[in-house]
Amino acid sequence: MYRIALIGGGGVGKSLLTFAFAKHLRKRGLDCATVNLDPGCKHLKYAPAFDVRPFYSLDKAMKQFKLGPNGALKKIYEKAASDKRMRAALDSSLDGADVALLDTAGSMELFLLKDGAEFLKRFADAVLFVTDDQAVSNEDNFLVLKTISAVQTLKYCLPTCTVINKNDLLEKAKKKEKQKRLTPQRGGRAAVVDNLRRLLEEIERKERLVFVSALERNGLDDLMDAVNELKCECGDPR
Ligand SMILES: Nc1nc2c(ncn2[C@@H]2O[C@H](COP(=O)(O)OP(=O)(O)OP(=O)(O)O)[C@@H](O)[C@H]2O)c(=O)[nH]1
Ligand SMILES: [Mg+2]
């Protein structure tokens, strides 16, 4: 059993990708389970083998702890990280599956925090850090993406792959142009950018970007290859 958490900011397509990638893996002969770990989600496109909502409700946590959605979310992940009852229920619901996709709540900061990182380390074997077309829309956004990705990986220490979803929105010609713009420019803050890039390359030597469209279901074989590479990085632990 290999557990892959899909993490990333709100609305980047984690849930649709969970649905599309699970379907794709099943077509390729794998027994793939889906898991909803977003306590606040109102609609699900897939039928989860395990759902966090009967254990933790975002609305209830907001009322109980008098917090806004982000604070309540942190509280829930903090509690869930050491929740043995939930863990046992999750384990038994995944019994017999080859792979499980864990769909998480949309937040860029959640897994940078101690409890969120702890939760990931305990529940996942690998991570797909999902972003969308906006993340590669210019060099600044791309560097921000790489920086967050590198910091997150340092925090939770799991094999991680960065996935650019909504590839369908990146028109082909524009994509080439954008990739060109990812090369540091001379002058201005070029030195800072160069140094940051070198540092990032050193930290995450093996990382590669995978472009997919959950909507149009393309790039999913590439994603499967990337997942297999992640598996080789750490072996199949369960
Ligand atoms: N064009 C396009 N839209 C997509 C793609 N993937 C997801 N979307 C759309 O993006 C919106 C958000 O998708 P979700 O899967 O709910 O995103 P999410 O990351 O799970 O969102 P939160 O759980 O709220 O953080 C929906 O309207 C999707 O239809 C894609 O590959 N291409
Ligand atoms: Mg979602």
Image (cartoon, rainbow, N blue to C red):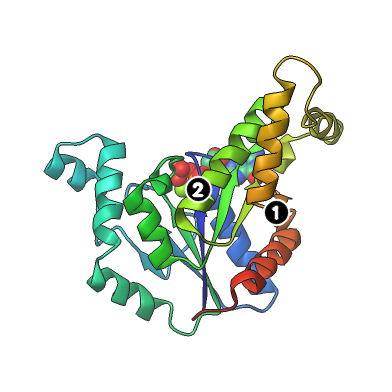
Q: Amino acid at mark 2?
A: Gln
Q: Which mark is residue 3?
A: none
In the displayed structure image, the side of residue 177 where residue 69 appears, left or right: left
Residue positioned 57% across, 55% down in the render: 128
Quick check: 154 above or below 88? above
Q: Nearer the viewer, residue 120 or 57?
A: 120
Residue 60 visible in the displayed image? yes
Q: Which residue is mark 2?
A: 152
Q: Quadrant of residue 52?
A: bottom left
Q: Which residue is mark 1?
A: 205
Secondary structure found at label 2: helix
Q: Quadrant of residue 59?
A: top left
Query: Which residue is most to the bottom?
Result: 96
Residue positioned 24% across, 61% down in the render: 55
Quick check: 49 above or below 67? below
* First of labels 1, 2 by sequence position: 2
Q: Amino acid at mark 1?
A: Arg
Q: Position of residue 93 (x, y in %)?
A: 38, 77
Q: Position of residue 65 (x, y in %)?
A: 14, 42
Residue positioned 29% across, 46% down in the render: 74
In the displayed structure image, the side of residue 84 where residue 38 appears, left or right: right
Mark 1 vs mark 2, CA separation in Å: 15 Å
Of the four image quadrants, the one with ligand 1 is top right
| Label 2: how many Cα within 10 Å (few below 14, some 14–19, many 20+) | many
| Label 1: how many Cα within 10 Å (few below 14, some 14–19, many 20+) | few
Quick check: 48 above or below 152? below
Q: Nearer the viewer, residue 208 or 206?
A: 206
In the displayed structure image, the side of residue 66 where residue 79 appears, left or right: right
